Image (cartoon, helix red, strand yellow):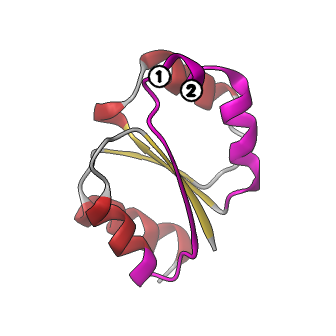
Amino acid sequence: MSVLIIGGDKIETVVKGLKNKGFEEIKHISGRKNGDKVNSSISKAERYDLIIVLTDYINHCMVTNLKKCNSNKRIIFCRRSWPLIEENIKKIFKL
């Protein structure tokens, strides 16, 4: 499975937890750089099984664009906390 993480700087704990859950391809976009705000970053999100948006570390414009491009129904909006992320993954994938 593949996951796109948007937001956050120090995501080592999240990446480690995702690998333990079976996610092999993990891509990270900071969500705060000017280049991250454009829709091309969001269009890349279509190919991932899951999108995790770390809401306390992301540009407001990026969140707005993600909500508009809601074709992938597997989007988690939460803080950078592995227990919260893990709980949401369990709900989505019925693990």
Kind of residue indicated by mark 1 = Lys
Q: Which mark is residue 58?
A: none
* Mark 2 surroundings within 10 Å by alpha-carbon count, few (fewer than 14), some (14 through 19), many (20 or more): some
Q: Say left or right for 40 vs 7.
A: right
Question: What element does badge 2 sit on?
Answer: helix
Q: Residue at x 35, y 35 (%)?
A: 55
The magenta segment: 19-48
Kind of residue indicated by mark 2 = Asp
- Image vertical order of residue 21 relative to residue 62, above or below: below
Q: Say left or right for 58 vs 1.
A: left
Residue 9 included in the magenta stretch of the image: no
Q: Say left or right for 56 vs 28.
A: left
Q: Which residue is mark 2?
A: 36
**Disc 2 to disc 1, how far (Cα)?**
5 Å
Residue 43 included in the magenta stretch of the image: yes
Query: Contact, CB < 8 Å: mark 2 with mark 1?
Result: yes
Image location of residue 73, percent across then percent down: 66, 51
Q: Residue at x 40, y 38 (%)?
A: 7
Q: Residue at x 47, y 22 (%)?
A: 33
Q: Which mark is residue 33?
A: 1
Q: Residue at x 38, y 66 (%)?
A: 15
Residue 43 sits in quarter: top right
User: 70 or 60, which lies in front?
Assistant: 60
Q: How many marks?
A: 2
- Image vertical order of residue 87 relative to residue 9, above or below: below
User: 6 or 91, which lies in front?
Assistant: 6
Image location of residue 2, percent across then percent down: 62, 67
